[in-house]
Amino acid sequence: MLNPLSPTAAVQRPSTAQSQAWMERARINLLQNYKQQPLVLERGQGTRVWDADGREYLDLLGGIATLPFGHCHPEITAAVKAQLDKLWHVSNVFYSEPQIALAEKLLLASGLDRAFFCNSGAEANEALLKLARKTQKERGQKERVEFICFERSFHGRTLATVTATGQPKYQQGFEPLLPGVLHVPYGDLAAVRRAMGPRTAAVLVEPIQGEGGVRPAPEGFLRALRALCDEAGALLLVDEVQTGLGRTGRMFGFQHAGIRPDGFSLAKGLGNGLPIGAMVCTEEAGRALVPGTHGSTFGGNPVTAAAALATVTLAMEPSVLASVRTKGEYFLTGLRRLAAELPGQVVDARGQGLLIGVELAVDAGPVVGRMREQGVLSNLAGERTVRFAPAYTVTDEEMDRGILALRRALAAPPPG
Ligand SMILES: *Cc1c(COP(=O)(O)O)cnc(C)c1O
């Protein structure tokens, strides 16, 4: 197996025949809706993946924050295999054990009261939006139908969640969008206050804007939103799809602010790579969704719930969250050092825990490509930000290798 970082790799020019053949079949057959990196991945273990021609890569993107414990984690794999031999699916016409046990863990970890399961982040946010409108109706506030969302946010691709998303590029061509969604600048409390009124059902916010360029909320913002929502009679909904499950060094991003939202969403990291989403809410809000009002055929499926139960169990180990914080600081410190050395090329390095963005002065696409050629995987969050969201098992040496690959991709010689 060739290591793309080894000096011989370039000389030997390993074959890319298998990968090329697969990509050609993809080009002919798949909907061309993704800007995909030219890599066909076949196998993964921990923080490493291998392509169809056997080349090894260090995966510092982790399926876009979907793999808190890395590829094919032995305990999670064992839990899923055991469930595969037991029961695959029954629908929510019946109860199934992994879903109930998973709900208990999420409530214990969050301090909220009710969990609903679905299959993706968009569906979890869709459930939050429906929850808010229904809760306001139950309160007798039937005029409260509007949502306050933020510019540069990302909440999903369904019509309601793409409307909530504060980025026109995701909305163009799909109009008319959902009425009653207002967008204000992220972190601008005065703008939220101005937008808030007798028609506001809820505020929907990410603790860190992930797709919008890995932008953490300003200090105190979530706490102030909580107070503002309480004052105004609006619900506070937190989109934890990217930030949840320990990614920021706390189990949920809102816990850094010490607040209790009325509801929050989860998906990406929840199943360590299997598709499962969740909407978690308070008792009062939960009461609004009585039998028949909302549902999902596959939501909380025994196999994906077993994966999530094993993932959440691992994430709830206090040493895990502490190591996410320590490693995140190590990575960010190294990236900030690089930023300080290359002020003309790197604008900012920011993030929390192991969700980190490096904003460049130039288009980040070619830089991500040059890192990949050195065997290190990342992606773009926005046009100019390189995103890292590695497994919590990432080592200091691996993070150093990421920083070195970024340095070389920016065509800067290593120090010393
Ligand atoms: C990825 C993401 C979503 C959408 O999740 P899907 O599973 O792709 O539907 C929603 N909100 C945030 C913050 C995300 O990062």
Image (tube, rainbow, N blue to C red):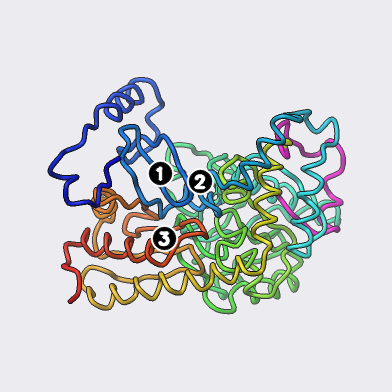
Q: Which residue is mark 1?
A: 49
Q: Main secondary structure of the magenta part?
A: loop
Q: Residue at x 40, y 51 (%)?
A: 59
Q: Nearer the viewer, mark 2 or mark 3?
A: 2
Tell me if residue 294 is in the magenta stretch: yes
Q: Which residue is mark 3?
A: 213
Q: Residue at x 36, y 34 (%)?
A: 40
Left of 386 or right of it: where is 264? right
Residue type, mark 3 in image: Gly
Res 203 → quadrant: bottom right
Q: CA distance from mark 2 to mark 3?
A: 25 Å
Q: Residue at x 74, y 63 (%)?
A: 110
Badge 1 or badge 3: first in the primary sequence:
1
Residue type, mark 2 in image: His
Name the foreground residue: 258 vs 48. 48
Res 357 → quadrant: bottom left
Answer few, some or many: residues within 10 Å of disc 3's Cα (few below 14, many 20 plus, some between 14 and 19): many
Q: Position of residue 113 (x, y in %)?
A: 82, 58
Badge 1 or badge 2: first in the primary sequence:
1
Q: Nearer the viewer, mark 1 or mark 3?
A: 1
Q: Position of residue 128 (x, y in %)?
A: 69, 51
Q: Position of residue 339 (x, y in %)?
A: 29, 73
Q: Position of residue 180 (x, y in %)?
A: 62, 51
